[in-house]
Image (tube, rainbow, N blue to C red):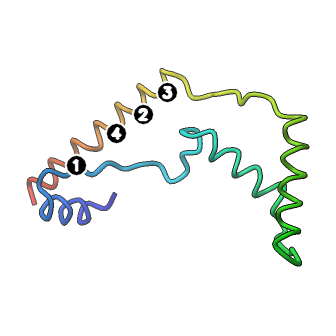
Amino acid sequence: MNPETVRRLTQAHPRLIPVHCPVHASWLNQIEIYFSIVQCKALTPNDFPCLQAVAERLEGFERYYESIAHPFEWKFTRANLNTLMARMRSRYAETHSRTLAA
């Protein structure tokens, strides 16, 4: 997050603690992963002649996907989380110290 943005936000809302969230955080939510798959596999290209065609494509994909689906293999471990949290704490401390110095 831009330091100037952090400064403006914390000045306007002193109790606010800005936290940078990853732009692509699909690992946080399985439904986001599923929606991404639906977008890529069922809705692209999106040249549907009518809404009924979209519904039919989605229903067909749902039936197909249920027949081949298997659980996602999570690669993000507790160690990864601890590393990420340490980096976030470090960046927060840097940003907070710069904000106080400004």
The percent coordinates of residue 55 (x first, y second) are 83, 62
**Residue in the picture at 34% in, 31% down:** 86
Residue type, numbered disc 2: Leu
Indicate left or right for 91 with 30 as reference.
left
**Residue in the picture at 15% in, 55% down:** 99
Indicate left or right for 70 with 67 as reference.
left
In three-dimensional space, the C-alpha distance between marks 2 and 1, rounded to whole angstroms, equals: 18 Å
**Residue in the picture at 77% in, 53% down:** 38
Residue type, numbered disc 1: Ile
- Closer to the chain start, of discs 4 and 3, is 3
Residue type, numbered disc 3: Asn
The percent coordinates of residue 26 (x first, y second) are 59, 44
Assess disc 4: are there few (<14), some (14-19) or many (≥20) residues with their C-alpha within 10 Å of its C-alpha.
some
Screen quadrant of the N terminus: bottom left
Local secondary structure at mark 1: loop
In three-dimensional space, the C-alpha distance between marks 4 and 3, rounded to whole angstroms, equals: 12 Å
Assess disc 2: are there few (<14), some (14-19) or many (≥20) residues with their C-alpha within 10 Å of its C-alpha.
few
